[in-house]
Each structure stands twice: as C-alpha cells, then as structure tokens.
C-alpha cells in the first residue's frame, strides 16, 4: 500500500468515525436517555447527563480534524514530520481533556444522585480507553518526532 492509498483509507475512516459520532451524539444518545427509566422520570438528570456527554464532542472533533491533516501530509509524502509529531501531541492532549471531562462529569452526576453506578462504571471503561488513546498518541508523537529528526539528519548528510 503506497502513501496515497493509505491517506485515502485514513480519510475514509476519519469520515466514518466522524459520521458515526455525530449519529451517536445527535440521535442515539438522546433516544436512549428518553427510554432509560431514571432519566425518563427526571428531566434535569437527563439534560445534565446529555449536556455532559455533548461536552465531550468539543475535544473530539478538533482531534479528528488533526487526524485529517496528518492523513493529508501522509498522502503528500511527509509521514515523518515535525508537524505530524505536533499534531499527535495535540491529539494526545485533546484525548486526555475528553477523558477528564467524561470522568469528572460522570463522577459529579453520580455524587449528585443523577447517575447510576452502572453508567459510572461504563463511563470509567471509556475513560480507561481514552487514557490509553492519549498515551498512545503521545508515544507516537515522540516516535514521529525522532524519525523526523533522523530523516532531516540523513538529508543533510546526503
């Protein structure tokens, strides 16, 4: 698979993930909260929970935009660049921000009695995945930066 094909595949996946997330945020979660018994009995809890979940979209979509930029640079032939390393570092920070928003929001709603233990545990599982994504993006950022430095050094040598 060449870089152009990889770039197209990555962009397609990014569009798919963005569309699926939009469907999740705009349709599926509001539908499920309307059917979930504790939320159907308490409109305040329902809207606070939905607002907290919708807040997690704020760091998510900029991270997708950064992924798109990385895919475009890969298609342009600069896979190992300082720009990609910086974008991965920003994705790591956005992922950690998203994870912290979910953790703090879920815990706060649980302490206020507006969240069930099962939802809190489910949110904690997503927090764990978000933390893993953040660490992975940070590690990739470091590796891409090192590879870009090596590539620049070898180009100077030639």
Image (tube, grey):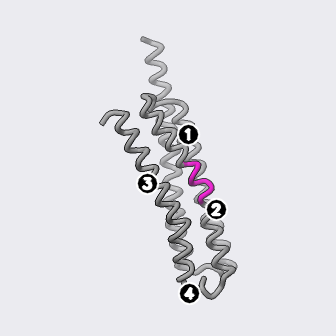
Task: Report the residue at 54% width, 43% height from top.
Answer: 66
- Say which element carries label 2: helix
- Say which element carries label 3: helix
The image's mark for residue 16 is: 3
Residue 51 lies, with reference to residue 38, above or below; the image says: above
Residue at numbered disc 2: 55
Residue 58 percent coordinates (x, y):
63, 56
- Say which element carries label 4: helix
Distance, label 3 to label 1, CA atoms, is 20 Å
> How many C-alpha atoms fall within 10 Å of the one at disc 4: few (<14), some, or many (≥20)?
few
Badge 1 vs badge 4, beta-carbon distance below 8 Å = no
Distance, label 1 to label 4, CA atoms, is 42 Å
The region drawn magenta spans 57-63
Residue 148 lies, with reference to residue 127, above or below; the image says: above
Mark closer to the observer (1, 4): 4
Answer with mark 1 or mark 4, whichever residue precedes in sequence: 4
Answer with mark 2 or mark 1, whichever residue precedes in sequence: 2
Residue 131 lies, with reference to residue 2, above or below; the image says: below
Mark closer to the observer (2, 1): 2
Residue at numbered disc 4: 37
Answer with mark 3 or mark 4, whichever residue precedes in sequence: 3
């Amino acid at each position: 698979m060449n870089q152009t094909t990889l770039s197209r595949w990555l962009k397609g996946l990014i569009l798919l993930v963005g569309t699926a997330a939009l469907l999740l945020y705009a349709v599926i979660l509001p539908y499920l909260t309307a059917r979930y018994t504790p939320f159907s009995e308490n409109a305040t809890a329902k809207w606070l929970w939905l607002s907290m979940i919708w807040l997690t979209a704020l760091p998510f979509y900029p991270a997708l935009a950064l992924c798109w930029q990385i895919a475009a640079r890969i298609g342009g032939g600069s896979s190992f660049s300082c720009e990609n390393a910086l974008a991965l570092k920003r994705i790591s920070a956005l992922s950690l921000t998203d994870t912290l928003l979910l953790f703090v929001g879920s815990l706060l709603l649980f302490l206020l009695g507006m969240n069930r233990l099962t939802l809190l545990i489910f949110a904690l599982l997503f927090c764990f995945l978000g933390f893993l994504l953040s660490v992975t993006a940070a590690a990739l950022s470091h590796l891409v930066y090192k590879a870009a430095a090596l590539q620049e050094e070898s180009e100077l040598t030639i």
